[in-house]
Image: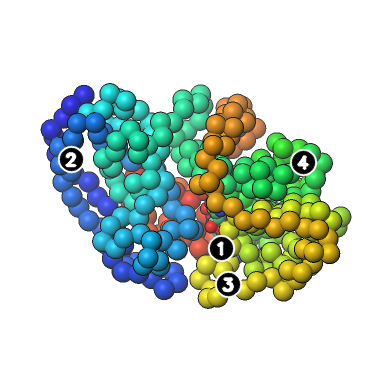
Amino acid sequence: MSSTATRHARAVHLVARPTGLPTADQFVFVDDELPPLAEGSALVENAYLSVDPYMLGMMEDADGGNELNAPMEGRTVGLVVESRSAALPVGTAVIHRRGWRTHAVVRREDVRVLPDLPGVPLSAHLGVLGGTGLSAYVGLSRIAELTAGEDVFISAAAGGVGTAAGQLARLLGARRVIGSAGSPAKTAYLTEQLGFDAAFDYHDGPVADLLAAAAPDGIHVYLDNVGGEHLAAAISSMRDYGRIAWCGAISQYVTEPPAAPHNLFELVGRSIRLEGFLVRNHMDAQEELYDLLGPHLASGRVVSPETVLDGFDRTVEAFLGVFAGANTGKMMVRL
Ligand SMILES: NC(=O)c1ccc[n+]([C@@H]2O[C@H](COP(=O)([O-])OP(=O)(O)OC[C@H]3O[C@@H](n4cnc5c(N)ncnc54)[C@H](OP(=O)(O)O)[C@@H]3O)[C@@H](O)[C@H]2O)c1
């Protein structure tokens, strides 16, 4: 379909660089009329926007971060509503990185066309099937090389990566899956609904003590989303030849400089491997993830937990909520 119609679109622009967490006045909502589509391009109406912890670094970083007076880049799923590209017919569901706006003009090379997985909602492509789930999968399978029968600890376990990781650990054959989270409601959710064997609220005491009680035999694998005290605690509880997949350090994103674990040298004595990773270097695992999770999502064995804020106007609120623990599962905005 070709179109010369203009369309009204909205975007949230970052207008000032924060130091630490941003405030609402560092963003403005901008209204625009989209120009007619050029040959080879398509108009996507965004349906769900992802808000992610890494975006804080993109806001702060003047060299290489997000541009000022422009929307935040970020994963977004939506449907093609107008097209001058034969490769992107109207109705195609896509994921792309032109986030924090209601509409995006894209070319075929800017998007990944989403597979049609029966019974799987579009939002799951930002959650357990998206970069979030892929981070959990890559961390556990490729980085930590989790094998059947091993015991796994996951921090920020009630978040996007964490809820995916708990379910994936189970599918990959973990013996005992332990999670930490920031409230009793979240720990109850993990053990009562998501299949974790144990979970603790990290506010309830020193993390090392809470983890030692939850994992009396120690842990083989740690997927670290939090860093700081959590990482030190996991090192203390690691068994010989344990592996730590370092995914993130959300407890330290607003701390300068981030503190190294006091017990790092224990890695040597127990031959523990600590390896960081970026999911964007493992996009070739995406098809594996679809193959693994598609049938389980359809059957209901695996779920894609999400906290959805309704309305584009709530994008900044949703982003800040991630740092305040406002989400269970993947935080996103529904347009
Ligand atoms: N390496 C990669 O390529 C990659 C890709 C994706 C994500 N990540 C990282 O993975 C981690 C999780 O990301 P996500 O998108 O899934 O976010 P998320 O876990 O859905 O949301 C962040 C959660 O972190 C917890 N949190 C916030 N401040 C904390 C603190 N000071 N101490 C402990 N927990 C805290 C909050 O839950 P509570 O209520 O439990 O505190 C919050 O819900 C982040 O560190 C992120 O940067 C890395």
Which residue is more in the foreground, 271 or 214?
271
Distance, label 1 to label 2, CA atoms, is 38 Å
Residue found at x 74% / y 61%: 234
Residue under numbered circle 1: 250
Residue under numbered circle 3: 258
* Residue 51 appearing in the image: yes
Distance, label 3 to label 1, CA atoms, is 10 Å
Please indicate whether residue 184 sits to the left or right of residue 287 in the image: right
Q: How is the image coloured?
A: rainbow
Labelled pair 3, 4 in contact (Cβ < 8 Å): no
- Ligand 1 closer than 8 Å to label 1 CB: yes
Q: Marks 4 and 2: which is nearer the front?
A: 4
Residue extending farthest to the bottom is: 256
| Type of amino acid at the residue the image marks with label 3 | Pro
Residue under numbered circle 4: 147
| Type of amino acid at the residue the image marks with label 2 | Arg
- Disc nearer the start of the sequence (4/2): 2
- Disc nearer the start of the sequence (1/2): 2
- Ligand 1 closer than 8 Å to label 4 CB: no
Residue under numbered circle 2: 7
